[in-house]
Image: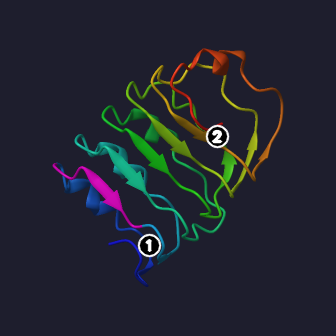
Amino acid sequence: MNNNSISGQIPPELYKLQTLKHFLLDNNNLSGYLPPELHMMPSLTILQLDNNNFEGNGIPSNYSNMPKLLKLSLRNCNLAGVLPDFSTIPGLLYLDLSSNNLNGSIPTNKLSPNITTIDLSQNQLNGTIPSNFSGFAHLQKL
C-alpha cells in the first residue's frame, strides 16, 4: 500500500497478520506513533514506512525483537528519541533511519555480520562510530 495518500494512525491490530512478510506503507500521509505491537509479527521480513510523519514519536525498542527482519526502513518519518539497539535481529541486512531527529549515541553492540546498509544520516546523533563497524565484510553503504 505504498505510494498512496493513506492518512491517520497505523492500526495496532495489524499485528494479527501473522503471516505477513512485507509491510510496505512508505510514501503516504501516516501520522501518530509507530505501534509497538508490530514486533509480534513472526513472519515479517520487511518493515518499510519511509516518508510519513510520526510526529516526533520514537522507534519502539521492542522492534529489536523481530527475529526474521531483513530490512528496516524508517527514513524521513519525523521520528525522535534514542536509537534502539538492533543487534538482536540476527539477519538484519538493511537499516535506514536517515532524515529523522534521532539523538544520543550509536549503540555499540554488533549488528548482523551480513549487514549491507546502515544509513543514519541527517539525525542528531553524537559520540563515536562504533569500532565494530569495521568488521562488516558485506557493508556497502555507511
Give whichever of discs 2 and 1 has the lower sequence position.
1
Q: Mark 2 points at which residue?
A: 83
Percent of width and height locating residue 11: 35, 68
Examine the rendered structure and indicate whether residue 131 appears above or below residue 106.
Answer: above
Identify the mark at residue 9; answer none if there is no mark. 1
The residue shown at (63%, 58%) is: 79
- Residue furthest out toward the bottom: 5
In the displayed structure, does residue 20 sit left or right of residue 122? Answer: left
Residue 23 inside the magenta-drawn segment: yes
Q: Which residue is drawn at 47% across and 76% down?
A: 28
Quarter of the image where the C terminus is located: top right
Magenta stretch, residue numbers: 19-25
Question: Residue 60: x percent and y percent?
Answer: 51, 46
Residue drawn at (64%, 40%) of the image: 83
Whole-Å distance between the Cαs marked 2 and 1? Answer: 22 Å
Find numbered disc 1 in the image and state the secondary structure of the residue it sits on: loop
Residue 115 x/y as whole percent: 49, 29
Q: Looking at the image, what colour scheme do you see?
A: rainbow
The one nearer the camera, 117 or 1, is 117
Which residue is situated farthest in the left direction here? Answer: 19
The amino acid type, in three-letter code, at marker 2 is: Leu
The three-letter code of the residue at mark 1 reads: Gln
Q: Quadrant of the N terminus?
A: bottom left
